[in-house]
Image (cartoon, helix red, strand yellow):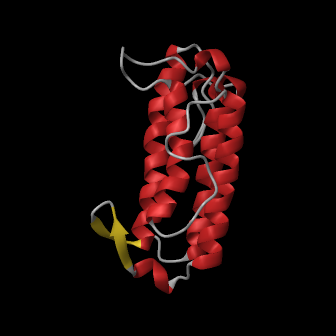
Amino acid sequence: MFRKIEDFERTWAHESEATLKILRALSEGSLGQSAAPGGRSLGRLAWHLTLTLPEMMKEAGLPVAGPPQDAPLPALAEIIREYEISAGAVGAEVKGKWTDAMLAEAIPMYGEQWPRGVVLTVLISHQAHHRGQMTVLMRQAGLRVPGVYGPAREDWAALGMPPQE
């Protein structure tokens, strides 16, 4: 749970950039890649991450710019653009409207009571969870996976080292 806005800002800057690295590594043709029939595709996962930012922040009482939940899946460039706008708005709204003291206050979230600091932690964990799903689908689609928390397989070769097993 976050206890300081400054800590969230620093983490959010890294995590939202990590999501953008994944989104920018997609191709328009890869958006239909899914693990199984009926499973979420790369495009749906990317759009879900984008739609979650305004949805979750609205639930937490912070209006964040972004597309409505029922917005249809757009082209990749629009997904990236909307994600950039919403991710920037999350950082600005949290910094501008919440204080360190407010992070410990419980608010209604999805039928439960969550401290605001937990809301921010869940937002980040949610993104990391779906980025992990996306990297598997990216490999299946033949895309290069960018390193997020460290080198990806292809990054080791660029460093002149064999990929780790």
Q: Is residue 140 above or below residue 154?
A: above
Camera-nearest residue between 129 and 72: 72
Q: Residue 86: image x %, image y %?
A: 64, 53
Which residue is depicted at the point 48% across and 45% down? Answer: 128
Does 76 sit left or right of 51 as displayed? Answer: right
Instruction: State the quadrant of the N terminus.
Output: bottom left
- Residue 150: image quadrant is top right
Horizontally, residue 137 falls left or right of residue 79, namely left
* Residue 68 percent coordinates (x, y): 55, 47
From this viewpoint, is residue 164 visible?
A: no
What residue sits 49% from the left and 46% below the top?
127
Residue nearer the viewer, 144 or 129 = 129
Q: Residue at x 59, y 22 (%)?
A: 162
Compare residues 15 and 160 and report the one nearer the observer.
15
**Numbered marks: total:** 0
**In the image, is residue 14 above or below residue 152?**
below
x and y, in percent, of residue 9 in the image: 62, 66
The residue lying at 69 percent from left, 48 percent from top is: 84
Q: Nearer the viewer, residue 73 or 32?
A: 73
